[in-house]
Image (cartoon, helix red, strand yellow):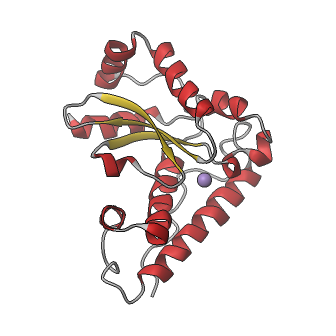
Amino acid sequence: METFKLPKLHYLPNALEPYISENTINFHYGKHLATYIGNLNKLIEGTPFKNMELENIIRNSEGVLYNNAAQTYNHIFFFNSLCPKGGGKPGGALLEVINSQWGCFDAFKAAFSAAALSLFGSGWVWLSADNSGKLFITQTPNAKCPLDDELTPLLTLDVWEHAYYLDYQNQRGKYIENFWNIVAWKSVEKRYHHIR
Ligand code: MN
């Protein structure tokens, strides 16, 4: 019996073009994410982790199980952070707090992009919030996920090369620039609303 299943994408595989191609979605979602989920299911089979929530597996594991559980979580979060005809700016409380912490939305964007560009090797860049609603831009290496630091993730960008190499080759900067056109701010706002 499979415990975790590849979740449905909320958009068609070609819907993020021209920013992320159907080819990249087919590999990144259809192969990379599917492989992490397949590995996770094999690793929890016959262990106390079976039937645990994904977040609890992440909080209670290490090594190869942690890596596959966290990569499953991170990728589902990433694909849910995107949508066709996204981009622009968030609104409401989220925009107010961004403005108060970074001065303006463009300064926040620049700080997030700089974090994504400067991350060495494979990893993730996150916008997260603590329990008081304070926002943080953080980098996590490899599979590491902000749940470990008691932060609630709001938005993430995958900067592993497999996320952009088919479309952008070595040009991570172009991938980051185009990411801003497909951010699902409505979902990010909703997540933030739940914390406050
Ligand atoms: Mn990835």
Q: Nearer the viewer, residue 17 or 3?
A: 3
Please state which of residues 178 and 41 is positioned toward the viewer in this rendering: 41
Which quadrant is the N terminus positioned in? bottom left
Residue at the location (55% across, 68% down)?
Answer: 36
The quadrant the C terminus occupies is top left
Vertical position of residue 112 compared to residue 60: above or below: above
In percent of width and height, residue 114 lies at 57, 25
Left or right side of 59 for 22: right
Residue at figure coordinates x 48%, y 14% from the top left: 107
In the rendered view, tell whether residue 60 sits above or below residue 130: below
Residue drawn at 49 percent across, 62 percent down: 72
Q: Quadrant of residue 35?
A: bottom right
Task: Mark yes or no: residue 101 visible.
Answer: yes
Q: Estimate the x, y position of residue 82 in percent, counting from the top left.
A: 54, 42
User: Residue 154, how many percent across, how many down?
Assistant: 38, 39
Q: In the displayed image of the protein, which residue is found farthest to the top?
A: 103
Q: Is residue 14 visible?
A: no
Q: Quadrant of residue 96?
A: top left
Which quadrant of the view contains residue 49? bottom left
